[in-house]
Image (cartoon, coloured by chain):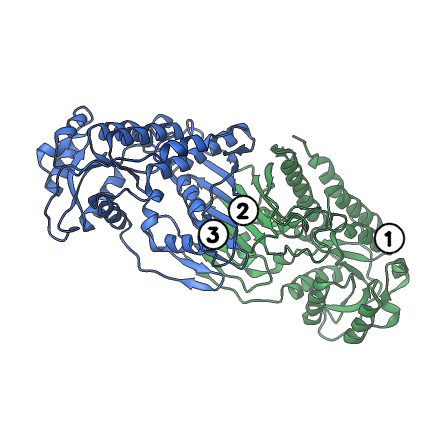
Chain colours: A blue, B green
Amino acid sequence: MKQYNRRRFLQAAGATVLIAPLHHVSSGAGGHNGRKLNIALCGLGVYAQILADGITASKFCRLSGIVTGTPAKAASWKKKYNIPDSNIYNYSNFDQLAGNKDIDLVYVVLPNSMHKEYTIRAARAGKHVITEKPMATNAADCEAMISACREAGVQLGVGYRLHFEPYNMEMKRLGQEKVFGQVRLMEISLGYKADDGTGWRTHRALSGGGPLMNLGVYCVQAARYVSGEEPIAVTAQFNPIVNKEVFAEVEASITWQLEFPSGAICNSTSTYTAGVDRLFASAEKGFFELSPAISYGPFRGRTSEGTFQFPEINQQAAQLDAMAATILAGKPLPAHISGEEGWKDCRIMDAIYQAAKSGQKVYIG
Amino acid sequence: MKQYNRRRFLQAAGATVLIAPLHHVSSGAGGHNGRKLNIALCGLGVYAQILADGITASKFCRLSGIVTGTPAKAASWKKKYNIPDSNIYNYSNFDQLAGNKDIDLVYVVLPNSMHKEYTIRAARAGKHVITEKPMATNAADCEAMISACREAGVQLGVGYRLHFEPYNMEMKRLGQEKVFGQVRLMEISLGYKADDGTGWRTHRALSGGGPLMNLGVYCVQAARYVSGEEPIAVTAQFNPIVNKEVFAEVEASITWQLEFPSGAICNSTSTYTAGVDRLFASAEKGFFELSPAISYGPFRGRTSEGTFQFPEINQQAAQLDAMAATILAGKPLPAHISGEEGWKDCRIMDAIYQAAKSGQKVYIG
């Protein structure tokens, strides 16, 4: 039963961050005081396309650059988004970003295990960084990323889009404000059927793990933002692997249980064997639930008193605008979308894997 | 990791049962060929009242007797249901049922730990028996009950009302007929807030355990009737106890994971700390769900293709009529509501408790 040394790291993480000034301020219409944040997307996979659409729909962001190792992608993105050659990078000349005043921030959308390297290199090039979730494949890598950004005086955010999504924020409010009393039980699961093995997500060297890494991180996040607590212990179970050829390197399905100081628990599954998408919390006086909850919507909410509805939004645009407005104003990103937040989730995922491998309860210090 | 010897017991359980003839056939109108099954309720708690209403609403049953240790209850039930003094028993003269041809069947609605004794005594008195769930507080007691009924040539059923409830039977059909393909993930939970400690359910000597005994048995049953499989392994976790005064003897909340031969899993919670009532199954091509699922209704069903609806029924009347029609016809009760079925669930619950206590995965042989 390993004790994670939380206090030591949080103290370090709490040190004052000196934030670099923006190198360049564009004057596009409709921006924050007329300004927009110039973003380079690093990695042009499926989610980068969704983010590009979010940037297009945003008020305060501009897609000013791209980083890709695939010349064909460079050509098509250049044409589609009118990106100058001087703002198109590959993984060899990436560090030359340092001299490019037309790029304020690098948004890392690479496979999980590459978040660390490109976050650190972007920071050393003097660029603010947003990295997709999971922040890294383990907490130690998160610590290195946080340190590099702190040393470079740049901001580091994690793409936790659901902090800008009305249904999830309602769940957070209902939980943390104890609208139905103290939360006692959470059931938060996310899965989809992906046992054909396409893509990098089943290759450990790139993904760092199976559905826990890709999907479980949302469940861990949600358990924390609904309860408003940090888990103190975890048990976990690798589930039977149905397709052993595809899942030779990572789990196909995993279940875990988080214990919180109040006595609340969260029982979760993340899986590539079947679809599930639900955030449920039951408290002393009633329950509240989203299903679907975590995907890109449309969501569906209910409580023990009835259903509820919010407008569907462009989650990526909402996230990007909130982050951009903060960075443009020279303010530090709020804690719940910071690198420290990503570190907290990765530390819990480290403990989940340790518990599943050992079959023992793991305490999170 | 204990191996439960399943084969040995199932072989014994499969032995031919000689069924006793009905002692008495009443000639009430509207019955099965004009006959009704004469039932004595043994134990007059909250659920006995619900069963009495079910008997009243049934076609083939008559409330002909009662067994109670409380004279005031005897008096009020006598008046309300017009029960003759000769059919009113207490726990001392219970065995005199043997000579009473006006009672065909004893329905045991006592606290869990008393099911064994009164099932065996009823069998020895030559009466058919239905016992409430859980059949007993452990599998060994179930074996003794099955043996006693076999020796006495009487039938033994368990009050699994959901086998006569349309929503649950639709879930069974969707799972077992693989309408959405092979089931991969089940999430089945049942809980209610009951941490005031009233009643016998928190006293181990009567209940045999906490919410697993009372509520979890439904989840175990449902996992089996939806998947159509028997679990081969289980992990389990006792959850933090919030009110230690009330839960000094039994768990307040428990989570567990069942593994099935196909690779399907079921992740469940049963709890007295908060409300939850859901049966969810996700298969290769879609999901199907009830929530509420297990309580007395009204239920609410949906699949990945949309919502579905059935008429709400009197679950107790449906169960009682189906059981009575079978017994009146001199046929053995079907396997899924038999004592062997109750034994299967208790055997799994034994393994769940063993896994939770030891922290080890327990294999069910």
Identified by mark 3, the residue type is Phe
Chain under callout 3: A
Chain under callout 1: B
Q: Distance between the residues labelled 3 and 1?
A: 48 Å
Residue beneath label 2, please? A262
Q: How far apart are marks 3 and 2 (CA)?
A: 17 Å
Residue B7 position within the rendered picture, expressed as x and y whole percent measured from the top left:
70, 36
Chain under callout 2: A
Residue beneath label 1, please? B124
> Is disc 1 surrounded by few (<14), some (14 to 19) or many (20+) residues within 10 Å?
some
- The answer to whether B59 is drawn above or below residue B329 in the figure is below
* Disc 3 versus disc 1: nearer the observer: 3
Q: Tag 1's secondary structure?
A: helix
> Is disc 2 surrounded by few (<14), some (14 to 19) or many (20+) residues within 10 Å?
some
- Residue B304 can be seen, yes or no: no
Where residue A280 is drawn, which disc sits there? 3
Identified by mark 2, the residue type is Ser
Pointers 3 and 2 within a single chain: yes
Q: Tag 2's secondary structure?
A: loop
